[in-house]
Image: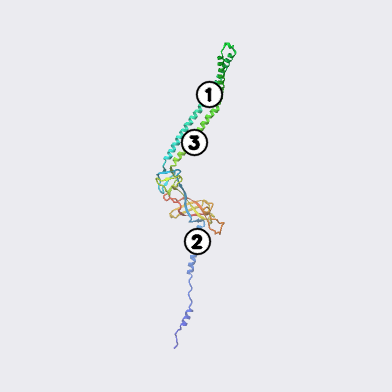
Amino acid sequence: MADTTTSPENGQQKEETTPRKRPGKKPLIILGIVVIVMVIVALVWWMMTRNQETTDDAFTDGDAVTIAPKVAGYVTDLRVKDNQQVKKGDLLLVIDPRDATAQRDQAQAQLGLAEAQLHQAQAQLDLSKVQYPAQRDEARAQVLKAQADLANAQAAYKRQRGVDPRATTQQNIDSANAQLRSAQAQLASAQAQLEVADQVQLQVRQQETNVEARQRQVDQARAQLETAELNLSWTEVRAPFDGFVTKRNVQTGTLVQAGTALFSLVSPQIWVTANFKESQLERMRPGNKVTVTVDAWPDMELEGHIDSIQQGSGSKFSAFPSENATGNFVKIVQRVPVKIVIDKGLDASRPLPLGLSVEPKVTLE
């Protein structure tokens, strides 16, 4: 009987001679499809974004001014609260106006006195235009009278000196001599007064200069009154434009000094300052359309355009600009601020505070 037992070595040899099954083509097909889909997605994404530039280094910006008084005093009336919206010209607060009112009243009194003195000088000028010619005519008449008196005195003196000494007395001769000298003196006095009275133009000009001086005093007093009224108006602090009151640090009764910061006023007209990399500016131009998303309100989408590109990187205008010409140099991609004006999409019920993070997307042409 034959032995049919199979040895272990024979069984192992039989298994090694059995051929293995090759993997099918299905995984390769799936891999190919995945690669094709990825290429298509990448191509579509590139086609959609090749004319767009975006950055997350962007913030809302706007006008914000510090409100400060120009006069010192106690705050007697505070009209605004924190974050209150105000209109241009609205009264924000009142500083005690009593000192300014007293200065205004004093300036008004000084102006009234100066105007009264001016009117007096004008009246004196009008009077001088009549008075001085009359005085000149009177002085001329006095000269003629003095000349006539001198002629009579000379005739009387000659008569006394020409008659027989026995027909007159020494007293009459002395009296005639005295009258002659008196007439000569009166004539000299009248001529001197005529020389003064004859300067009518100079005398009138003197009054005109007096009027001009009084007019300058009126102008000075009026300027002082305007200054006093201006100081009085400064006791009322008003809003220079529409906006929101922020960072208020004043209360009723606070003693404020001129130039002290009371609060800030933020304009509702905002824009976006986006700091793009210098490598993103090649095709960027003013006027490019921009869509902006706000981190605080994801459902809000704003539309605007590029207004301008700053002529200098942010580091160039920093407090301590880098000195690339010293030491070792490491190239760092610079960022340039770009101003984006918002055209539509703002909601008056949800005003955007300054400094919010936004993400602009610029469509290049």
Q: Quadrant of the N terminus?
A: bottom left
Which residue is at 48% across, 69% downward? 27
Above or below, comparing residue 199 to residue 29 in the picture: above
Please tell me how crowded label 3 is: few (under 14), some (14-19), or many (20+) other residues with Cα within 10 Å: some
Q: Which residue in the protein does label 1 denote?
A: 135
Q: Which of the two discs, 1 and 2, sits closer to the camera?
A: 1
Q: Are marks 1 and 2 in contact (CB under 8 Å)?
A: no
- Looking at the image, is mark 2 or mark 3 earlier in the sequence? 2
Q: Pointer 2: residues within 10 angstroms few (<14), some, or many (20+)?
A: few
Name the residue nearer the viewer: 246 or 131. 131
What residue is pinned by disc 2?
42
Q: Secondary structure at mark 1?
A: helix
Toward which corner of the image does residue 256 lie, by quadrant?
top left
The answer for how far apart the CA atoms under marks 2 and 3 are is: 80 Å
Q: Which mark is residue 220?
A: 3
Query: Earlier along the polypeptide chain: callout 3 or callout 1?
Result: 1
Task: Give, as a three-letter code, the residue at label 2.
Answer: Ala
